[in-house]
Amino acid sequence: MYILSYLPLCFLCPFQETRSNEESTDESEEDESEEEPKLKYERLSNGVTEILQKDAASCMTVHEKFLALGTHYGKVYLLDVQGNITQKFDVSPVKINQISLDESGEHMGVCSEDGKVQVFGLYSAEEFHETFDCPIKIVAVHPHFVRSHFKQFVTGGKKLLLYERGWMNRWKPSVLHEGEGNIRNVKWRGHLIAWANNMGVKILDMISKQRITNVPRDDISLRPDMYPCSLCWKDNLTLIIGWGNSVKICSVKERHASEMRDLPNRYVEIVFQFDTEFYISGLAPLCDQLVILSYVKEISEKTEVECCARPRLDIVQPLPESCEEISSDALTVRGFQENECRDYHLEYSEGESLFYIISPRDVVVAKERDQDDHIDWLLEKKKYEEALMAAEISQKTIKKHKILDIGLAYINHLVEKGEYDLAARKCQKILGKNTELWEFEVYKFKEIGQLKAISRYLPRRDPVLKPLIYEMVLHEFLESDYEGFATLIKEWPGDLYNNTIIVQAVVDHLKKDPQNRTLLRTLAELYTYDQRYGRALEIYLTLRHKDVFQLIHKHNLFSSIRDKIVLLMDFDSEKAVDMLLDNEDKISIDRVVEELENRPELQHVYLHKLFKRDHHKGQRYHEKQISLYAEYDRPNLLPFLRDSTHCPLEKALEICQQRNFVEETVYLLSRMGNSRSALKMIMEELHDVDKAIEFAKEQDDGELWEDLILYSIDKPPFITGLLNNIGTHVDPILLIHRIKEGMEIPNLRDSLVKILQDYNLQILLREGCKKILVADSLSLLKKMHRTQMKGVLVDEENICESCLSPILPSGIFCPVLQYMQCQTPGARKCSPGDEEIAVA
């Protein structure tokens, strides 16, 4: 695609003009004005400017390699796509009506108002001249004129003539059509020629030399010379017709063989038809849409007289019976006030989406807007985020814009609007790893007093800015926001700034407010970054900060906490004990117990957890633990006495008896062998028959049962408990015989029934066990008998287990044993010399 580098249009002001009906509101008009234009416009300058200062353009045709411009003074200029003159032809002293080029761009046909027609080669000596007695309005050379067998062209005045070069290079004319007025326009595409006269549009098939259609014009009231017909081939089979304010899109189709008869083998179908608001001066296809150049008249507000307005270039989407307007631009071309509908022409370059608007004093080029143009429009409308997104998507194709420049403009725009946080957030994406731009933006935020806004988004790794930048931000927070300052210290790596400077600044602020916990906590973190862990630990302990344990573990500060164990325990005894026990090699058990000597409650917590981990490690402190448990944790005293094998029982018994701990005393008495005293204490102190019975069961001592029965014999509730539980350990008759006559025993009947049920259950269990034992004994006896009855295979190597002599002396043959072996079922038959026998 050619790149247009035209001069700026200082007088050309195409703008997106809004069309609305009478019911449209101002708001809707404003919304439509925000729509982006579809095309951009440039004035074709350079040589064209020089030509139109002395002459006026009458027609132009476009080739992909060059442009051909005809003027009112009979000149034809060949131009490059930038408007520079490359060649000039003096064809006639009067107006050039039409210029035609073949597809190769090597041959050109020209006709003029004085009846002259010329067809010649631009790069060869081939030439045809003819002068008619009437103005020739149109000329069209065959699209493939460069080929020898397609040397054809048509001209149009009062009749349509086809010229063909024949034998001896002579040109032979033939009339294709006449009798319907002057030929106004002609377009040749492939094998089809379309032309317009005063009556309508015709299409001729050059293969069959048959006319295949006639499309009449709609508004016959318009003068065909003032409002000429516009023709345009979209492709080889689609013709677009514009006449007056009517548009028809016609499709050439093949006729089915069964329908031909005497008809042409092709026919034309109008697939789209609609009317426009203004008069049509030119047409061109744009993908599946249409570009329409319209001539506009309007009533002057000053004189109230109809006058010529600026021409419009519209893009419409054809529909079956109407069209949808995509965009509409009014063009300020030079001299538009004096122009008529016939003075405007629209030409286009296929494949490049370039549209040329020709008027007598101006040539304007319209082209589809590219991504650079789209970004320009977005920036103009201050839609920076959309512009940035568009640039990122099309960064390989845009030529005019840079993503960084758009991003910086976006940041500046946000700052101007006061959206400082969003501007700072966008810096991350836009500035990337450019440290110079980062530092520039930080200083800019400082000037407007918004360092806090950008602080969260400053880079911390790849890239890293100068330490001064980070220190400047920290000082800003330190002066006004302690919490924000603490957050930055926690989030930023300590190597971003000069730690000594920040520490001194914090110390200075603490002189004014020495109890400020936020500053103290932050100072501890700064000391940690500076590897002054001792000072950090002191502050953390003073603050009772949760990170103190993490600090100790991370930096192995156990030597620093030997005299701070009480502080740690007061802060969080659970974590402190776990840490101390996990690091016994660094702080010994003896040292911890010694440090906690004046805080027995903390000493107990430590020793209790030590005992839970290992029953033997702290055995030297088990005697001390008895008093600690008794004082601070009685529920765990009995489990401790049961699990410990190192605590002195006499000491424990003395403490428990002093404090009247019955359960613990009972356990100690039983463990020391004084079961009777223990049982007596249960019955006299606890008055709990169930516990007494359970204790007697555990000891399984007949004398204890006797003591229990004697103690319970005059206490009916105890008797009931014994009757319910004694049956499986002691003969209930012993108890029943001792019950005094007339004593009321609660639930006696139920107790007796339970005794009988327990007895029956015991009988059933015994009988069941007896049956199982008898059955097992019989089964094992049968198995033993079968085993003993089995034969045993012996040979000379087997010996007698009693005398250790060989069972079969070598060389001895026993016919009886051999006979018995042969008669044994399943035994193999003996063969001579076989020494093995079967013994049953």
Image: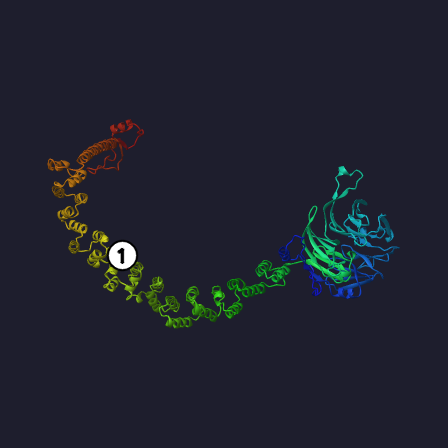
The residue furthest top is 823
Residue 733: x and y in percent read: 13, 35
Q: Which residue is mark 1?
A: 609
Q: Quadrant of residue 711?
A: top left
Query: In the rendered image, which quarter contains the N terminus?
Result: bottom right
Q: Is residue 16 above or below residue 504?
A: above
Which x, y percent locates residue 396?
61, 60
Q: In which quadrant is the C terminus drawn?
A: top left
Q: Is residue 88 left or right of residue 385?
A: right
Q: Nearer the viewer, residue 216 or 701?
A: 216
Q: Is residue 718 above or below residue 36?
A: above
Colour theme: rainbow
Task: Choose top left, top right, bottom left or bottom right for residue 482.
Answer: bottom left
Q: Quadrant of residue 543?
A: bottom left
Q: Do we see residue 474 in this rendering?
A: yes
Query: Which residue extends farthest right?
Result: 133
Residue 112 location (% of width, % of height): 84, 58
Q: Please provide percent x and percent y for residue 264.
A: 79, 42
Secondary structure type for disc 1: helix
Query: Left or right of 292: which side holds 499?
Result: left
Number of numbered callouts drawn: 1
Q: Is residue 459 left or right of residue 199?
A: left
Q: Residues within 10 Å of mark 1 (few under 14, many from 20)?
A: some
Of the residues shown, which amino acid type is indicated by label 1? Lys
| Residue 458 shows in this picture | no
